[in-house]
């Protein structure tokens, strides 16, 4: 199973650790999306910035 993470709020004015988490998720602007395998590491990153991202589950699998 895969999940799609989309940035929905700006990174301006947020803490540097949260900005780094967005960068690690590959999100560099509002409306940008990235698809990941549903793993605990990714879920943990999303848990740090839930107010900045939207998560869509049951997305088509990621090519590895």
Image (cartoon, rainbow, N blue to C red):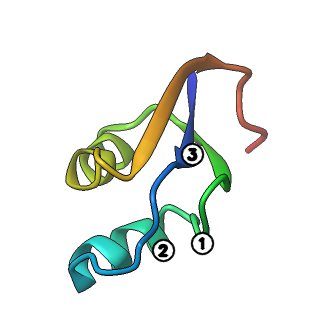
Numbered tag placed on residue 38 in the rendering: none
Instruction: State how many labels appear.
Output: 3
In which quadrant is the C terminus drawn? top right
Residue reaching furthest to the top = 58
Q: Contact, CB < 8 Å: mark 2 with mark 1? A: yes
Quarter location, residue 18: bottom left
- Badge 1: how crowded within 10 Å, few (<14), some, or many (20+)? some
Query: Left or right: where does residue 55 sit relative to residue 16?
Result: right
- Number of the front mark, 2 or 3: 3
Numbered tag placed on residue 23 in the rendering: 2
Query: Left or right: where does residue 59 sit relative to residue 20?
Result: right
> Which comes before the other along the chain, label 2 or label 3?
3
- Location of mark 3 (residue): 6
> Which comes before the other along the chain, label 1 or label 3?
3
- Location of mark 1 (residue): 28
Q: Looking at this view, is 16 or 1 the one in front?
A: 16
Query: Dot 2: what SS?
Result: helix
- Number of the front mark, 2 or 1: 1
Query: Dot 1: what SS?
Result: loop
Q: Looking at this view, is 9 or 49 the one in front?
A: 9
Quarter location, residue 36: top right
Image vertical order of residue 58 relative to residue 12, above or below: above
- Badge 3: how crowded within 10 Å, few (<14), some, or many (20+)? many
- Report the residue at 38% width, 47% height from top: 42
Residue reaching furthest to the bottom = 16
In which quadrant is the N terminus drawn? top right
Query: Left or right: where does residue 16 sit relative to residue 24?
Result: left
- Report the residue at 60% width, 72% height from top: 28
Q: Residue 29 location, x and y as percent?
A: 61, 68
| Separation of marks 2 and 3 at Cα, in angstroms | 12 Å
């Amino acid at each position: 199973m895969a999940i799609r993470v989309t940035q929905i709020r700006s990174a301006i004015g947020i803490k540097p650790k949260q900005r780094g988490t967005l960068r690690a998720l590959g999100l560099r602007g509002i409306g940008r999306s990235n698809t990941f395998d549903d793993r605990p590491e990714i879920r943990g990153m999303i848990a740090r910035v839930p107010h900045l991202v939207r998560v869509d589950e049951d997305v088509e699998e990621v090519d590895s």
